[in-house]
Amino acid sequence: MKLRALIVDDEPLAQNIIEQYAAKLPDLEIAGKCNDAICAHKFIEQNEIDLIFLDINMPKLSGIAFLKTLKNPPIVIFTTAYSEYALEGFELNAIDYLKKPFSFDRFCKAYFKADELIRLKRGNRREDSKNAVPDFLFVKTNRRMVKIKFTDILFIEGLGDYIKFHLKNSRIITNLTMKKVHDLLPGKDFYRIHKSFIISLDKIDSLEGNMTIINGIKIPIGNSYRQEFIKIMKNYFANS
């Protein structure tokens, strides 16, 4: 996948040089050009950008001041004729600093540093996506697959070979075992308190003897589950 770059420079000649250099690199695409920071800010809001070639000395707003306004800026390579800005540029986490006029070789060195970092970040995002825990599941009911968000579940009731999801605004019955659905639920949010009931811990309204109350419904706590359940619930007792 190509890296998408934005050129921000008020000098047409400088823009053209970067475009010419970029054209020689097959994995680099110039997605846009801006003459000032105001244009660049709008462009970044409306487009996905991986890299900015950013001039420092520009009218209206300097490149450094502009970069400070961005909450999650793309990777930046500063381009400027003034070397005194280099230190401040690096303090803003710019990947490199190109002093005009710069050669194609020097341009490539900066680009390859940016390319390595960007692709590393992309790889990390893909890995995070793979490892992300879903916040929902799909169950089959009435010949269709229905999405159930975990946050909508009040409790789950076992009915022999079927289970019933008691949700905020509905009930859904599906052919599933209690063990199977328990394995699919996030353990920190749900707890089995009876052979026939799994509850959402944050939906509990009150505890009364051997009962939990959720949405006005009394749900029994099984003898074999009670000790472990009370141990967990004590973490939430303010005056235990």
Image: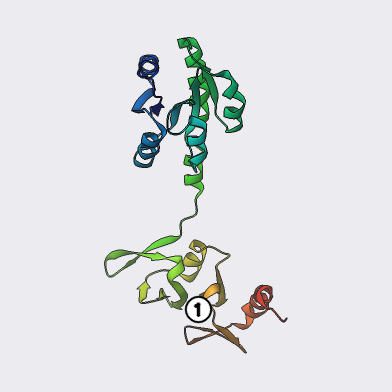
Q: Position of residue 93 (x, y in %)?
A: 57, 32
Q: Looking at the image, which is closer to me, 21 or 142?
A: 21
Q: Farthest residue to the bottom: give it.
A: 209
Query: Against 92, is 144 above or below?
Result: below
**90 relative position to 57: left or right:** right
Q: Looking at the image, which is closer to me, 4 or 175?
A: 4
Q: Looking at the image, which is closer to me, 208 or 156?
A: 208
Residue at 48% of width from left, 65% of height from top?
Answer: 180
Using the rendered view, name the quadrant where residue 2 is placed: top left
Q: How many residues crowd mark 1 within 10 Å: few (<14), some (14–19), many (20+)?
A: some
The colour scheme used here is: rainbow
Which part of the image, by quadrant, shows the C terminus?
Answer: bottom right
User: Callout 1, which amino acid?
Assistant: Ser
Query: Against 106, is 49 above or below?
Result: below
**134 relative position to 189: left or right:** left
Q: Farthest residue to the left: give it.
A: 143
Using the rendered view, name the quadrant where residue 201 is placed: bottom right
Kindly identify which residue carries mark 1: 196
Q: Is residue 200 visible?
A: no
Q: Position of residue 24 (x, y in %)?
A: 37, 14
Query: Against 226, is 63 above or below?
Result: above
Which part of the image, by quadrant, shows the N terminus?
Answer: top left
Residue at 46% of width from left, 78% of height from top?
Answer: 157
Q: Farthest residue to the front: give it.
A: 60
Q: Is residue 171 visible?
A: yes
**10 relative position to 232: left or right:** left
Query: Against 5, is 165 above or below?
Result: below
Q: Looking at the image, which is closer to me, 86 or 225?
A: 86
**221 relative position to 73: left or right:** right
Q: Position of residue 47 (x, y in %)?
A: 35, 38
Q: How many labels were placed on the picture?
A: 1
Helix, strand or loop at mark 1: loop
